[in-house]
Amino acid sequence: MDDDETQSDVPTRREYMKYGSAVVAGGLLAGCSEQSGSEATPTQSSTPTASTPTETSTPETERYSVTMEPVGTLEFDGVPERVAPFTADYIDMMVALGHGDAAQSIWYQGRYKTRHYEELDGVSIDLDSLTQIWNDGISKETFYDIDADLHLMDPSAVTDWFQAWDQQDLEEIRSNVAPFIGNVIFRRTDSWHDYRYYSLYEAFEKVAEVFQERDRFEAIRSMHDELVATVQSRLPAPDERPNAALVFAGEEPEEFSPYRLSGNGANKEHYHTLGLSDAFAGSGVDGLSTTDRGTIDYETLLEIDPDSLLLRYHKRGKSREEFEDTILSYMQDHPVGSQLTAVQEGRVFRGGPIYAGPLHNLFMIERYATGYFPEAFTEDELFDRQRLADIINGNV
């Protein structure tokens, strides 16, 4: 900000949104949700402060609030224009709501799967414009450089998941840059996540409230509900559906990091839609969490011998053909891996994104319905791409 701007009596729109919201979020660290606005009045300092209504204040009719655990309630004076998300599931929500251009950051670009946007006319995101927050740690300077209006991330992600900051660091960024709102939704296996968990569409609805995009949200939810109803009406009986082992694997896998198909987690909701059961159930194998980073080998997999395998890997955007030519081919030639029933019967699939947003979810339901049950789903597409693109582009 230059000297002329710092001497102005009237805060800019970004300043008003940012600092007005920060006052309501004052209980961030304690997780409180009901607080009143400040009684301070604006000054000519370089750091704007919250004020009681004046001639330059945002009209009450334009203000709105969003409540989401663990932060509580934030009050907004306008839709945020620069937003710093953490995981790709929240960026996918922003894209779905027509606000992908507002996204400024991501914690790890390699785990943001964007191939599905190529099937939606006029829908894309500039990955190179996203600042990667994680670089051998999480620097506060990066947050200052991004200078967002809002951090669309669970504050526990940096204090408890990565243990990168303490509460004082969090309060510094909240006070000097922008407030936080968000909830880690991709899994629910971490002991520190002892507050409310949100399903994918519960979190998506909160993000829609942040961006004031109720119509887009309802239209996409309607498409989702139609797809789920269509798919579930044509599934075979539960005892005729295969179980699945969901794991992380490398290009030439020799060990696997297990996930659990059962339990909460937005990255597994499409599997639940199809009624796939967890091959690790009752096996004593636990899923990845903050404290459990265990791996299993081919011999353990062979003991369980799942009906199907869902393999996740770090590289972005691998096609089915590339997957078959690399990872699957390696397993087919492996002396133990080739003995797995899933490998022999051709039920080895890409595991999909770990940070799955609502657009990911639609494509994943379709992918696994047609992959697991080709006799029941013979058509190539189970939902209307053009309709979805029109909604995202504003033609609700």
Image (cartoon, helix red, strand yellow):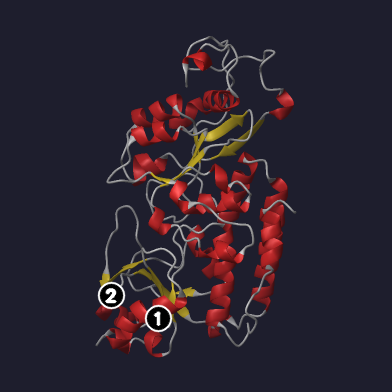
For label 2, the SS is loop
Q: Earlier in the sequence, mark 2 or mark 1?
A: 2
Q: Residue at x 42, y 90 (%)?
A: 345
Q: Residue at x 57, y 11 (%)?
A: 42
Closer to the camera in the image, 45 or 26: 45
Above or below — where is 229 with respect to 188?
below
Residue 392 visible: yes
Q: Residue at x 32, y 86 (%)?
A: 332
Q: Position of residue 55 (x, y in %)?
A: 70, 13
Measure the C-alpha gap from mark 2 to mark 1: 12 Å
* Quadrant occupied by the C terminus: bottom right
Closer to the camera in the image, 231 or 361: 361
Closer to the camera in the image, 232 or 144: 144
Residue 264 visible: no
Write down the quadrant of residue 278 in the picture: bottom left
For label 1, the SS is helix
At label 1, the amino acid type is: Glu
269 sits left or right of 234 in the view: left
Closer to the camera in the image, 391 or 154: 391
- Which residue is under mark 2? 252
Q: Position of residue 212 (x, y in %)?
A: 67, 41
Q: Position of residue 360 (x, y in %)?
A: 54, 62
- Which residue is under mark 1? 324
Q: Residue at x 45, y 68 (%)?
A: 261
At label 2, the amino acid type is: Glu
Above or below — where is 272 with respect to 175?
below
38 sits left or right of 299 in the view: right
Above or below — where is 366 with respect to 196?
below
Q: Judge the density around disc 1: few (<14), some (14-19), many (≥20) Cα neighbours within 10 Å.
A: some
Above or below — where is 209 with respect to 189?
above
